[in-house]
Image (cartoon, rainbow, N blue to C red):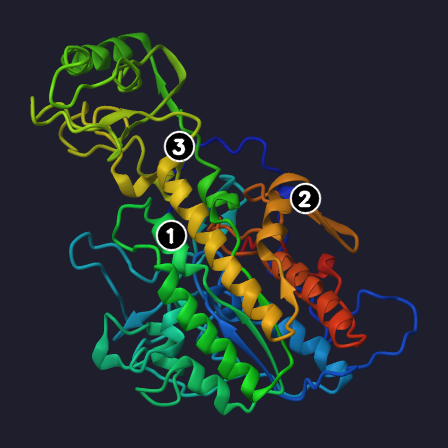
Amino acid sequence: MRTNYIWLLAFSVISFTACESDDTRLADPIFEETTAVEYTSGNADFSSFVAVGNSLTAGYSDGALFAKGQNVSFPNILANQFAVVGGGNFTQPLMNDDIGGFVLGGNPILHPITGANLFPPRLIFDTAAQVPVTYPAPSTTELMTTIPGPYNNMGVPGAKVGHLLAPGFGNMTNFPNANPYFIRMASQPNATVLEDALAMNPTFFSLWIGNNDVLGYAASGGDGSNPITDTATFTGAYNMVVSALVSASPNGIVANIPNVTDTPHFTVVPHNPIPLDAPTAGAVNAAYAAYNAGVQSLVGVPPVNLTQEEADSRMINFAEGSNNAVVIMDEDLSDLTIYNPALVGMRQATSEDLIVLTASSFIGTLADPGNPMSVNGVAIPLGDKWVLTPSEQEEIATATQAFNQVIADAAAANNLPLFDANAFLSQAATTGITSGSVTVTSDFVTGGAFSLDGVHLSPRGYAIVANKMIELINTTYNANVPKVNPANYTGVYIN
């Protein structure tokens, strides 16, 4: 996500007791059970466990990939438990530090237009200010310093399902189309992720892929810069990956795609965070008076024939108080610029709109530093990338459902257990999830399930995922692999 957060939200209810130190207190392995039991691999062979996927498999959290986060990735947790029943060594392409982010020639890698750090350090929780902040040290992991694999953990942050099959996805000469994480870990520049996974001769595999096929679109507010993968492409690529893995080993586990809008990234920032005093509200309303009148004057006028309902939904009005809705652009509104270029498709947000977490550091800033009336979200509408409108949410939900059906069909056809990550995160967002002595929810910072980026899981969240997978593995393969105690894993890093 990005540089220090200037949060508009008041985290006054966040308690320091919800945070823990960076000590994950890991033993190898950690047992949830306290009584003597016999552990067995059952019908499975864990001697060469290979995990294939994206950032969720890599152990990405708090907006970055970093070494101690990788060490509590769910595949590494599983591998520790598999070791009790004959599992072998598990290798990961560890980052150079616990800071996260990349540098190129010792310097941050900046966006050519905005100047933003494309691969910043991870976030930590500032207990004094009660907000997430960027880790106060520069990254040390050089993008050009490769550590060729293959590895047991073949989770590549940012990968979509088709990327697993793409030659050159780890070739620096293809940058920026190549993936920086795979560049440093690919066995050779034109190897595919799947080829490297198969090179490990897996006897057991996990496959959790597809999140980015919808998440990229969602995280960008549905602005079209990162479109949802079409279902036919997803289906073909996913089935090719599963077929290849099953051909190497019939034993494994797959996971489906969560509803991304169940994550804090889309639920933390309210649609109405704007505080205004009476004079400011009056001044803003005066500025929007011509827009409001112009829209209302076009009700029923051909060729658009604007409805009264839509005209009313586009009215922009502010009042004295702390809960004014932000002004947003909405591409689904009728195009009134054919009558007047000033009548752009804007309206105030409603509770049905989802404002992305990163907007919290943008709302309230000035579009023009020299103009105090150019407040983003008030005088200047939020662009598409900051908001998921109801229609965009519907697109995401439809794609997620279709992709999850593809995954379910592939799991059934190959007798693979299916971890229902969609139901898992839905439960976290509603009733919470209890595992061992802890209960986690999707509440931002305090819930324990999610990291500070609001999308990826915390170490505790990954531990509970590992436990859920172990339950499925034990049932499917007549095994008795020990689970872990999630209480031994942190919910939020504070350093």
Circle 3 residue: 353
Q: Which residue is mark 2?
A: 432
Mark with earlier residue (2, 1): 1
Amino acid on which disc 2 is placed: Gly
| Secondary element type, mark 2 | loop
Coordinates of residue 335 in the picture (x, y in percent): 16, 29
The residue at the point 65 percent across, 81 percent down is: 251
Q: Amino acid at mark 3?
A: Asp
Q: Is residue 144 above or below residue 313?
A: below
The earlier-in-sequence mark between 2 and 3 is: 3
Q: Vertically, is 74 above or below 335?
A: below
Viewer-side residue, 294 vs 127: 294
**Residue 1's mark?**
1
- Dot 3 crowding, Cα within 10 Å, few <14, some 14–19, many 20+: many
N-terminal of the pair, mark 1 or mark 3, is: 1
Q: Residue furthest right?
A: 36
Q: Amino acid at mark 1?
A: Met
Residue 321 image point, x, y percent: 40, 13
Q: Quadrant of residue 171?
A: bottom left
Report how far apart the C-alphas of labels 2 and 3 lie in the structure: 24 Å
